[in-house]
Amino acid sequence: MIEVEKKKRLLAELILFFVTFLWSTTFIGIKWGLEGITPNLIVAYRFTISLLLVIIWQHKTLSSIKWDELKWGLLLGLLLFIAYVSQTIGLKYTQANKSAFITALSVVLVPVISLIIERKVPKTASLIGVILAVIGLYLLLISKGGDVNKGDVYTLICAIFWGLYIVVLSYSSEKMGTNGLLLGQFLIMTIFCWIVISIMGEKPILPGKRFLFIILYLGIFCSFLTTFLQTKFQRFTNSTRVALIFTLEPIMVTVFSFILLQEVLNLVQIIGAMIIIAGIVVSEIS
């Protein structure tokens, strides 16, 4: 029995490592996509595809979804909408590797957000993790004499709303079914994206072959598949091990952005990035 549980945990962690790999390629895909498509259209196309896949996947159980589940899913979708749009806009103005490390701050922001919303006092190690992350962020952003651009600010907004998403998801997933939460998220994100596009007067354009491939990849693999795999397999291992696996994401992005985008962090930025990772590890191991 113990051996079976170990095998389940190993399989789950390998799959979550694969999920982390897919997430890390998102930054590169968006950077390439922004060469020919606006940030709003990238997010809209990406989550329209994901919504259609969720509907196809859940078509037999849609009628059994409860309003309470859908309601929490809509709230989660609103938080994700702000996070994804701000991250995508941010990637237009900042490096993919910087974006990945700033986004990773969401993990250490969770204790602070929990303190504000749920009145949960964070553990000492969590506070140490926050302090380390703030120091790391400072070195990452201020390493070139005040070289903070608006892309960094947009990405920091993304990290804050990712942290909010984690807190709300933790609360709602304990009480609600997965199907309603999943459908609600993709539904509200898709609707909001197209509303924003309409308000801003952007014209939906049919992407060429290269950009169509990028959009399909982001929608199928980096949104729908990652959400499905995380939902299905994360329960077979503990949250600390999951968090440590996900910590690999910005490191992978740094490697990919160097190889594919020729983006390089200087020494001070590398030190800042490593301090952010240390903050996340300290916070999660607590």
Image: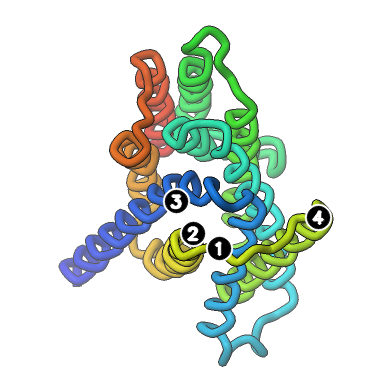
Q: Is residue 214 left or right of residue 146?
A: left
Of the image marks 4 and 2, the number of the one nearer the N terminus: 4
> Residue 207: which numbered mark, if any?
1
Residue 50's spot in the image, x, y percent?
A: 55, 70
Dot 1 falls on a residue whose secondary structure is loop
> CB of mark 1 within 8 Å of CB of mark 4?
no
Of the image marks 3 and 2, the number of the one nearer the N terminus: 3
**The residue under label 4 is which amino acid type?**
Gly
List the residue tagged with mark 4: 201
Dot 3 falls on a residue whose secondary structure is helix
Picture quarter with the C terminus: top left
Of the image marks 3 and 4, the number of the one nearer the N terminus: 3
List the residue tagged with mark 3: 29
Residue found at the far right of this picture? 199
Mark 1–mark 3 Cα distance, whole angstroms, equals 14 Å
- Residue 117, located in which quarter of the rendered image? top right
Mark 1–mark 2 Cα distance, whole angstroms, equals 5 Å
Of the image marks 1 and 3, the number of the one nearer the N terminus: 3
Picture quarter with the N terminus: bottom left
Relative vertical location of residue 269 with respect to residue 285 in this rendering, above or below:
above
